[in-house]
Image (spheres, helix red, strand yellow):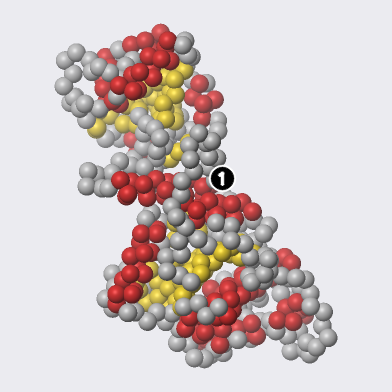
């Protein structure tokens, strides 16, 4: 309170035109924020900040005792169903004061006004002083400006607040870029760990450097030590190379929704995961964790994952594959795994956003020799735990006894969904295999090797964290 007042007095002393207050745990992502705010003539204006709830950096109303009061306009303003500049009871956390306006001389954070009996809080006292001086406050929600976390309860710990701020930073990077770090403060991240996994892989296409940059920064924030794998790019595949691997499309496969064969992107995606399974088997890894590069993390991701791993160890659970992120294709209840609150037996699911797989799980996935009867990897995995609706496809694989489970609730989600801005699919939006291209039964001897593709054991693999 006194520090804010001291800052305000210093700004007046140096004849500043404006003073801009930003709380340290607010994240601004719009580089036009100051230009927009200074374009208004009003004395006190705040850019509306988003949160994961209805909370924001303004109050729609205040009662006579100085406490928050919900107003009918709050929700539509907060959800941007109404857009514009709106007079509100109070702004806080991030806002600007136009010191060129004469009425700004009446504003203060401290001391409280004479006769004040409300809460001893800097922004509430600021609002009370502004109200007595008839200086209105405004919130501007035309644009997206940034984010903040809702205040925690008294019983929450500093560690929990730290984790929530990390989550806020991770969410900010989904649409933005990794943050520039000031040279005036040391750069601190949690120690890099693998949480008991023998390896953690992150799959990324080389031609998607923005995804790699975001994931590297996100995993750095989470303290996870990962091996980055250059994905097999469907745009660089040719039939000669696929023949050399023995790749052949599963007999009778047509993508369920568009009734089309495999795309080159889907083949590249399958191979990316397949090569990871091969690497895990070759190195005799007991358990590994896999991420794709388009995931967003739930709050307390590491804490929740550590808790799950401990629960698995304590219960001596024999697991083989556990989804951390997926798309449920059926909405029937999935039975819980006995003795677990947050683990279910997975039903038919799409996506391979993130999963953990054991040595036995890897063996079962490889033993089917799936390159010779290929379909998308997120169709193959549910077939292997026998929860796929297409009997003709399932019957070409045996046994189908993979122990497939999932966290519930999920720990990761996709950064974007179909139809949203910035949604990109490198599997669906790629070249489709034609029947003329399926030469997998031909003699492979003497065929040229084709283009060099990423080998996760070679120089294309990078320990970037």
**One can see residue 100 in this view:** no
**Which quadrant of the view contains residue 307?**
bottom left
| Residue 423: x %, y % from top left | 58, 55
- In the image, 13: left or right of 398? left
Is 195 positioned to the left or the right of 155 in the image? right
The residue located at (28%, 69%) in the rendering is 341
Q: Position of residue 270 (x, y in %)?
A: 61, 74
Mark 1 residue element: loop
Residue drawn at point x = 43 percent, y = 79 percent: 320
Q: Which residue is mark 1?
A: 177
Q: Which one is nearer the viewer's eye here, 302 or 151? A: 302
Corner quadrant of residue 165: top left
Image quarter where the C terminus lies is: bottom right
393, above or below 100, in the image: below
How packed mark 1 is, by other alpha carbons closer than 10 Å (few <14, some 14-19, many 20 or more), is some
Write the residue at 49% across / 91% down. Answer: 399
Residue 91's spot in the image, x, y percent?
35, 28
């Amino acid at each position: 309170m006194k520090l804010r007042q001291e800052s305000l007095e210093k700004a007046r002393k140096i004849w500043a035109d404006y003073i801009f207050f930003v709380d340290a745990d607010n994240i601004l992502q719009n580089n036009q924020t100051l230009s927009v705010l200074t374009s208004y003539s009003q004395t006190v204006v705040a850019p509306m900040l988003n949160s994961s709830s209805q909370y924001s950096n303004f109050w729609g109303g205040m009662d006579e005792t100085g406490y928050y009061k919900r107003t009918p306009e709050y929700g539509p303003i907060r959800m941007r169903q109404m857009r514009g500049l709106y007079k509100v009871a109070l702004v806080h956390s991030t806002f600007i004061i136009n010191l060129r306006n004469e009425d700004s001389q009446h504003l203060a954070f401290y001391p409280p006004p004479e006769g004040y009996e409300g809460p001893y809080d800097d922004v509430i006292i600021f609002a009370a002083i502004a109200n007595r001086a008839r200086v209105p406050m405004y919130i501007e929600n035309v644009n997206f400006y940034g984010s903040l976390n809702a205040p925690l309860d008294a019983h929450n710990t500093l560690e929990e607040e730290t984790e929530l701020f990390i989550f806020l930073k991770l969410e900010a990077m989904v649409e933005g870029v990794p943050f520039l770090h000031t040279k005036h403060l040391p750069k601190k991240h949690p120690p890099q760990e693998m949480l008991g996994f023998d390896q953690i892989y992150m799959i990324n296409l080389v031609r998607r450097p923005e995804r790699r940059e975001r994931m590297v920064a996100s995993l750095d924030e989470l303290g996870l030590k990962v091996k980055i794998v250059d994905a097999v790019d469907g745009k660089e595949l040719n039939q000669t190379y696929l023949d050399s691997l023995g790749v052949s499309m599963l007999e009778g496969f047509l993508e369920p929704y568009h009734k089309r064969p495999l795309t080159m992107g889907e083949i590249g995606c399958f191979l990316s995961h397949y090569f990871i399974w091969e690497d895990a088997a070759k190195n005799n890894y007991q358990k590994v964790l896999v991420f794709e590069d388009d995931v967003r993390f739930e709050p307390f991701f590491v804490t929740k994952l550590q808790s799950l791993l401990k629960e698995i160890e304590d219960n001596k659970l024999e697991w083989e594959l556990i989804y951390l992120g997926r798309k449920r294709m059926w909405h029937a209840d999935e039975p819980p795994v006995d003795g677990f609150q947050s683990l279910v037996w997975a039903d038919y699911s799409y996506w391979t956003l993130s999963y953990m797989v054991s040595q036995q799980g890897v063996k079962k996935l490889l033993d089917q020799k799936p390159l010779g009867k290929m379909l998308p990897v997120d169709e193959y995995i549910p077939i292997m735990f026998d929860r796929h609706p297409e009997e003709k496809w399932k019957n070409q694989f045996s046994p189908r006894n993979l122990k497939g489970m999932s966290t519930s609730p999920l720990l990761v989600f996709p950064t974007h969904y179909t139809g949203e801005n910035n949604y990109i699919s490198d599997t669906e939006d790629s070249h489709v295999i034609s029947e003329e291209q399926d030469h997998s039964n031909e003699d492979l001897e003497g065929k040229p090797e084709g283009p060099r593709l990423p080998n996760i054991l070679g120089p294309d693999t990078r320990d970037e964290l």
